[in-house]
Image (cartoon, coloured by chain):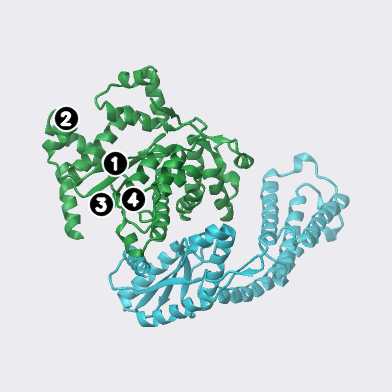
Amino acid sequence: MQSNFLKLHTQLWGILLLCILLTTFAVAALAPLKPIDQIKWLDCLGEGGIAFMTLLWLVATLLSRPKGKVTQLLFSGLTAMHISMLLDFLDEFYNFDHAPSWLGGLEAFPALIGMVLMSIAMYFWYQEQQIINFMLNKKERFYREHGLTDFISGLYRADYMKQQIDKELLTLKHHNIQFSLALIDIKNFSKFNTKYGTTKANSLLADIGQIILLNLRDGDLACRYASDRFIILMPNTNLPSANQVIAQVSSMVSQHTPYSKGHTITGCSNVHWLCVQAQINEQQDSLLSRLNSQLNEQKSTL
Amino acid sequence: MSRFFEINDSVFTAHSLILPIVEMASQRGIAPDKILKGSKLFYTDLNSHYKKISFAQLHTVIFNTTKLLSAEGISFLLSERLFHSMPSNALQALLHAAHLQQMFRVSQLRQFELFPYMFATSYRSPNQVHFVINFAISEPVLEVRCFFYELLAGLIECLLKWRFNTQPKTAVKQHKLHIRFPMEQPAYIEQFHSHLNSDYCFSQPAFMISLESIMLRQKHADSLPAMTRFYLKQPILSQPMIGFKQHISQLITQMPKATSEQIAQQLNISSATLKRKLKQHNTTLKTLKDELQKQQSLIYITERGYSNEQVATALAFNDITNFRRAFKRWTGKTPSELRACISKSITHY
């Protein structure tokens, strides 16, 4: 995935620049300048500010989105709005009364078209978001906070999971709906790390994260815990069913064979795993330390 | 007299700690200049073999790291890297040691090469050995202190894991350490869960690692002590040195009642200069004296079960009231409150 869309939109950047220049030159050519003492500086500041902000939104849109229909619509709409605002700003310096009458009439018109285009863009954006939400299923529950994403695996971090656990603990307390947690620990991850390097190890973490996601049920949530551990929240699930789900996940993960210089690496994706069911009146931190110490215990006896 | 270095002396190689930090940060989307901000270091410096850095610079970089990447467990990841990148002669001597006690001695002998940032003082109680660990160069700010606690705990964990991985698992279980962290339980507790196999607890009055005495002299089945002696005899590239704070602390241990003039005399400087230097290292002579006495009294009370009279005598206090008042100032608790606390936690277990 490309992380920077700056170079992707060269054509659109060109069109934007052209529109701005065209507008400015047209106004400069057709309308005479106002004398200095007629310029209202406060209006300049306000209208200039508005024009600048629409330009900023345009840039942000182009920086954050890949090519496509929604991007084009957003771009066209915002550009049209920006031209209106720009004309508004320029009429503080140029006298539109002495210019051809269509120039003055043009002032508000692009904004209207722009807003219509933006509304259409919003409709498609909504549809696009529905599809993305579907893809984020099992990675996210009701709440989006990009600051909590783990950079290496692309999943949410433990902090996100803690919030969700708190929420589930409340549901357990008030409605007595059971939930289970699972911890998955990659066997010999530090050896893999030393042998193949951090970059390879990081991509192994990302891969395993994805495999876990694929093999969970709808409504389950997987996050990266720390180091080589993943944590899974299974709402409305008792311990036996949780064990069943995670046994399946772990067998799928252990099938994974990453490539290094054309060769497959086997045996690096075996995992330790453990499920616990939350008890009523248990606290989030004691639940987590119970889960971890039980897993450590299990690791040391194997 | 041993040589010592100060907070602004450039004595460390940049690639042992800072380079991996910068690398890990950029893997997590933080640009090198943000991590290096304020340290007067450039990214290109880090690849130079000759570039030396000071503890002050290291402190700045670690402080930036704790601010920018607080929940990422960089300290623990760094400890794994550090373990693999330690100078080979010192590391070999350490790994071939006959038992844990010899390992500890090697780590003291080769402190500058292995981990010059902190130093340990060992204390014995009837069944256990306790290593009280303090900062060697200057007293860092809280965030950086926590980073170093985690770094050292992770490093010891790596070392023990490496040493005992070749032995049957039952042997590993016996080698459980108990680590007491003087910090509050952090929000990123998951990093402790995932990286530390030892027992640990938080909000303790001192950074202390304890283990059973019998473990200390238990011979490692496949150790080669001759190799340790061999590697210790190999020439070292840099003169052994200790940090400024460690040096002063050692002088205080030798002369507990020494005045600042007497300490300054040992360093061939005036007492005003000593005071200025101590301030530069974020400490004072009184703080260092208190630190030592506080830790000694903690061991006496919690581990050896001394009465107040015995501790007061051992620490050369004139009377018990004075001692109790001082103890309350150091730890926030009176000796009897601390005893009650311990007996409560024992019954709790």
Tell me the chain of label 2. B
Q: Which residue is drawn at 24% across and 49% down?
A: B128
> What separation in Å lies between label 2 and label 3 (alpha carbons)?
33 Å
Q: Mark 3 points at which residue?
A: B214
Quarter of the image where one finds residue B166: bottom left
What's under tag 2, amino acid-wise? Phe
Q: Mark 2 points at which residue?
A: B317
The colour one sees for chain A in the rendered image is cyan
Measured from the top left, where is residue B322 in percent x and y? 15, 31
Q: Name the residue under label 4.
A: B184
Question: What crowding class fits label 1: few (fewer than 14 Cα within 10 Å), some (14-19), or many (20 or more)?
Answer: few
What's under tag 1, amino acid-wise? Ser
The colour one sees for chain B in the rendered image is green
Are discs 4 and 3 both within one chain? yes
Front of the two marks 1 and 2? 1
Secondary structure type for disc 2: loop
Could you tell which of marks 1 and 2 lies nearer the N-terminus? 1
Are discs 1 and 3 both within one chain? yes
Question: What crowding class fits label 3: few (fewer than 14 Cα within 10 Å), some (14-19), or many (20 or more)?
Answer: few
Q: Which residue is drawn at 82% across and 57% down?
A: A18
Front residue of this view, candidates B76 and A38? B76
Question: What crowding class fits label 2: few (fewer than 14 Cα within 10 Å), some (14-19), or many (20 or more)?
Answer: some
